[in-house]
Image: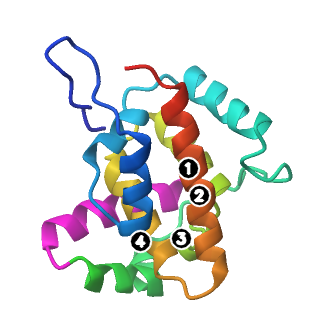
Amino acid sequence: MTTAKSTETGERQLPSQEEIARWVEAGEDLPTLAALFDQLPLARYDILVAQIRKEELLPQHWQVISERTIPDESIFEELPEIRRLRSRYAEDGLAERRLGALEVAWRELAGKQPSLWTTPDLLAALRRIIDRQRQVDFHDLLSAVRDVWRDQKLPRGRDQLDMLWACLAFVRQKTKK
C-alpha cells in the first residue's frame, strides 16, 4: 500500500471535499485520496461502510460477491475497458500502476468486468484488499475505476461516479487527520 503523506506534526494529509469533487468531475490527480484508506484497519473500514449504508448512500440490496475462483490474467488484458484505459494513459508507468491496481481488485471480485462494477463492488474489493493486506495504491485503483466509469456512454457510469463521490465525501468527513 502507499504511505499517506504526513505533515510535520505526524498528521495524514487528507483531501478536502472540494479536491474530491474536482477529482470526480474533472479527473484531476489527487494522491492524497489514498490517505482515506491507507493503513486503515479492517474493523474501522467495516464501521465506515456500515455508516455509509446507514446513511443510505448505497443501495440496500447489494451483496458481496462470494465466488473465489481466480480468473486467468490474460482475460483481464482482453477486456475492452482495459484496452481503452491503456490508450487513455499516455505514460506507460501510469498505465502500469493504475491497471495493476485495477487488476488486483478485478481478481478480488472474481473476474467481474470493471465496466459492470458498482460502487458496492468497489467497496467490496477494497475490503478484501485491506483484509488481505494486498500491496495496492488506492489512488491508482480509485482513479482507474473513475476513468472506467467516466468512459461509459450510458448514465450508469455517471450514477456510479455520483455514488462513489458521496461515499468518498462521507469517508473524508468521518476520517480524522
* 10 Å crowding of disc 2: few (<14), some (14-19), many (20+): many
Identified by mark 1, the residue type is: Ala
The N terminus lies in quadrant: top left
Kindly report the distance in space between the C-alpha atoms of the residues bearing marks 2 and 3. Answer: 9 Å
Three-letter amino acid code at disc 3?
Pro
The residue at which mark 4 appears reads as 147
Where residue 27 appears, as percent x and y from the top left, is: 35, 66
The local secondary structure at tag 1 comes to helix
Disc 3 target residue: 114
Q: Nearer the viewer, mark 2 or mark 3?
A: 3
Question: Which mark lies nearer to you, 1 or 4?
Answer: 4
Q: First in sequence: mark 2 or mark 3?
A: 2
According to the picture, the residue beneath numbered tag 1 turns out to be: 125
Q: Which amino acid type is shown beneath numbered disc 4?
A: Asp
Which is closer to the viewer, label 3 or label 4? 4
Query: At x 33% / y 66%, what residue is drawn?
Result: 99
Amino acid type at image mark 2: Leu
Task: Please tell me whether residue 119 is drawn above or below residue 5 in the rendered image.
Answer: below
Whole-angstrom CA distance, mark 2 to mark 1, is 6 Å
N-term-proximal mark, 2 vs 1: 2
